[in-house]
Amino acid sequence: MSNIARSTHPGFMDYVRRDLYLSISSSSDACAPLLFFCMVITLVPLSISPNPEQLAELAPGLVWIMALLATLLSIERIFVFDHEDGSLEQMLIAPNMMTFSVLGKIIAHWLSTGLPLTLLSPAVGLMLALPENAYGPMVISLGLGTAYLSLVGAVIASLTVSLGRGGFLISLLAVPLYMPILVFGTSTVTYAVAHMPWSGPLAIMGAMLALALVLCPLAASAILRVTHSG
Amino acid sequence: MVKRDRKWRWFHQMGSPRWFYEITGGWLPWLIPLALSLLAVGLFWGLFLAPPDARQGQSYRIIFVHVPASFLALLGYYVVATAGAVGLIWRIKMCFIVMKAAAPIGAALTLIALFTGAVWGKPTWGTYWVWDARITSMLILLFLYLGVMTLQRAFVSKDMSFKAGAILALVGTVNIPIIYKSVDWWYTLHQPATLKLTSSPSMHTDMLQPLLLVICGFYAFYLMVLILFARLEILRYEKSSNWVKTLVAEGNDS
């Protein structure tokens, strides 16, 4: 909050710093997606099989599905608190370009959920007996992919924020849009497991991320304007 | 200037729900018989008169429901998205009403396409469900439809529900090519060797003619249901306006 008091018109960096600060100060919120990620992974050996060969086969898909769900669970937070305490209104009436403020918030969301999740993924891969040569592709694909998930999720979250009860609705709306990135993300890892060149699907993920990086902040800020004009 | 005004008048008149209600009231008496007779003739021809397929026998006949339903399920999403976009850009309420009416119809058609596909899959592929590229795309399309419908229902304010639904439909439209391509790519990766389409590459005219007739019938039927749903939605939306109240009073008297 001190950042907003200091500068009259908070911009991109102010929002990145503010949202990061807020998520760190309420550490339970910041850790929840990570804990969820690890705990649900624990359910897999318990429910399917602890056999390393079987787990290794499922690992690429599992890691990706869990990362997707963890992002989905946390994406509601991106606008809902701002909506409740009125700072979203301040963002709407600020004279500078709202797209960059929204982009700042999205990047902060990725830094507080997607990036830690990516960094944690080798540990999960280890627990699921993922072959060694797949660690690099998994980390790179999750890094790009979780950024995409945050960007697209922010568009959906902006649609539902004025309802005040996103939860299930966000999941219903976002999951169909998440399917393509899941396809390419898991393929990158499975290609690596099969000792095939994995740069192809990764390049497509990069292209999708570039497209989302341009379009999603624009779309989300336009939606926030529409849904707050009454 | 006057000429230009006249040229565009229909466009602005379309924006008035009352005008739409009155003009479509005149269309329905011939549209309903047309749609129903096209469907009846086409289906009778296809299901009873057309010759059986050389390899699939009688089971291929479900094509006369499956193909038109799949066509219109896809087209229906573009109707939803286009109506939503026009409504958002020119702020025309009527377009939002059409969009809201089109979403459940499209969802129902997608469900019909999936169901008939499953029924058809049993005798031809030996299983009700395969994770085939086209089936999976259809399933995702159903999710997109349901998403638009759920979002619209979640808003209390009509205006907001219209706008939010339209935006979501547009976001979905941007994603449809990406989803389609990714599913296609995914399928070529995992393609099972056993699955093979048994239909011949070109259709015999005896089968093609009734199929075209049924497709025309489905188009007419779609238009009819869309108009009926939109009229219902107009009455709901304008229920506090005078013209609807008089209409209801007249309906109660007769």
Image (cartoon, coloured by chain):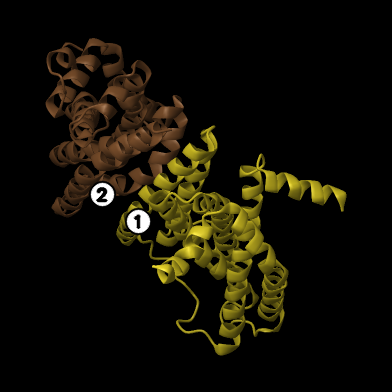
Question: Whole-percent x and y of residue B38?
Answer: 67, 76
* Image mark 2: chain: A
B17 lies above or below B193: above
* Image mark 1: chain: B
Label 2 and label 1: CA atoms lie apart by 10 Å
Task: Classify residue B52 as left or right of residue A229.
Answer: right
Question: Whole-percent x and y of residue B183?
Answer: 35, 56
Residue extending furthest front? Answer: B2
Q: Is residue A62 visible?
A: no
User: Badge 1 is on which residue?
Assistant: B183
Q: Colour of chain B?
A: yellow
Of residue B110 and residue B240, the one placed in the foreground of this image is B240
Q: Residue at 40%, 60% (x, y): give it.
A: B133
Q: Quadrant of the N terminus of chain A?
A: top left
Total labels drawn: 2
Q: Secondary structure at mark 1?
A: helix
B129 lies above or below B155: below
Q: Residue at 16%, 55% (x, y): give it.
A: A200
